[in-house]
Image (cartoon, helix red, strand yellow):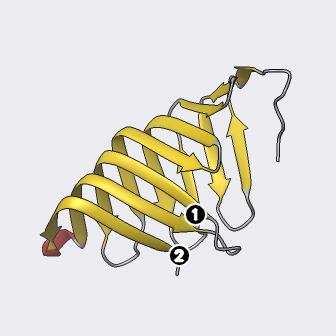
Amino acid sequence: KEWELKAASATLLKDEDKAVLIDVSIIFFTKNNKKVRLTSKRGTLNTTTHDMVFSDNVIVKYETSVLRTDKLHYNKKDHIIYSDTHVRLEKKDSVIEADSMTTRLNDNMTILKGHVRGNFSENFKIQ
């Protein structure tokens, strides 16, 4: 299982192979069966490819880290989430911001690009 999706409402647009989602909650599973939780106000699901786009207050939680952005994409084929808009990654007293990011869900790897900057507490650990 790669993901579980819940939404307050879903409108199916058959001609466009798309479902329009409101108040989205999704759990992505890694190959180690760890959970990455995402919420957003809006989303779209391509009913053919199962690729998704989330927007409007996107929040991703993984263990003790929280990622915030305005728009986030999910690519099913590669099982990655990515954003080409500003991202903010928070972990305890530390913050990293960047212009874009890609997370490889099966590899437990996040790549931040473009104007990467942050503040780190003395207890910050990258895992």
Identify the disc placed on residue 35: 1
The residue lying furthest to the top in this view is 119
Of residues 46 and 33, the one nearer the viewer is: 33
Q: Amino acid at mark 2?
A: Glu
Comes first in the chain, label 2 or label 1: 2
Residue 34, given in percent of the width and then of the height, sits at: 64, 66
Instruction: Give left or right: position of 39 versus 99.
Output: left
Q: From the viewer's perspective, is residue 34 above or below residue 127?
A: below
Residue drawn at 73 percent across, 59 percent down? 108
Instruction: Report the Cα–Cα distance between label 2 and label 1.
Output: 10 Å
Q: Residue at x 23, y 58 (%)?
A: 21
Q: Amino acid at mark 1?
A: Lys
Position of 52 relative to 115 (above/below): below
To which residue does mark 2 refer?
2
With 52 as the anchor, is 64 left or right in this view?
A: right
Instruction: Report the side of 34 relative to 6 (left or right).
Output: right
